[in-house]
Image (cartoon, helix red, strand yellow):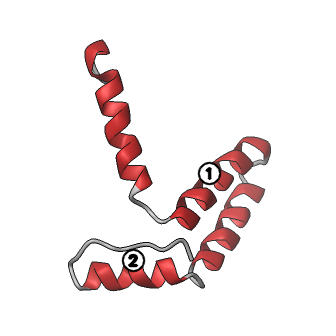
Amino acid sequence: MVPDDRVLPEALEVAVTIASYGRAAVTAARECVDRALETGLRDGPLFERRVVHALFATDDQKEGMTAFLEKRAPVFKGR
């Protein structure tokens, strides 16, 4: 919750943060949210688990983990 005069600045700040994440992860997160609206508590987590496992095969995941360990900002390439 934010005051009315802070809604747009806060929304833009959140958008910039999301845009800094890897494209594959953001897309997958959106798919999980969409799927959660269509499925129940049994099927939603199963779908999410499959998506997370698939993301571990991406170059961006490896870059994210390496950047974290090296205490630097990641440079995602969308792969």
Q: How many dots with numbers? A: 2
Q: Quadrant of residue 65?
A: bottom left
Horizontal and vertical percent for residue 26? 54, 58
Q: Find disc 2 in the rendering and name its residue.
A: 64
| Residue at disc 1, secondary structure | helix
> Image quadrant for the N terminus?
top left
Q: Is residue 9 left or right of residue 65?
A: left
**What residue do we see at 43% from left, 53% from top?**
19
Where is mark 1, residue-wise?
A: 30
Name the residue located 23 percent from the left edge and 76 percent from the top edge. 72
Q: Amino acid at mark 1?
A: Arg
Residue 1 seen in render? no
Going by the numbered disc 2, the residue's amino acid type is Gly
Crowd tier of the residue under label 1, counting other residues whose Cα lies within 10 Å: few below 14, some 14–19, many 20 or above: few
Q: Residue at x 35, y 25 (%)?
A: 8
Choose between 57 and 77: the one closer to the eye.
77
**Residue occupying the far top of the picture:** 4
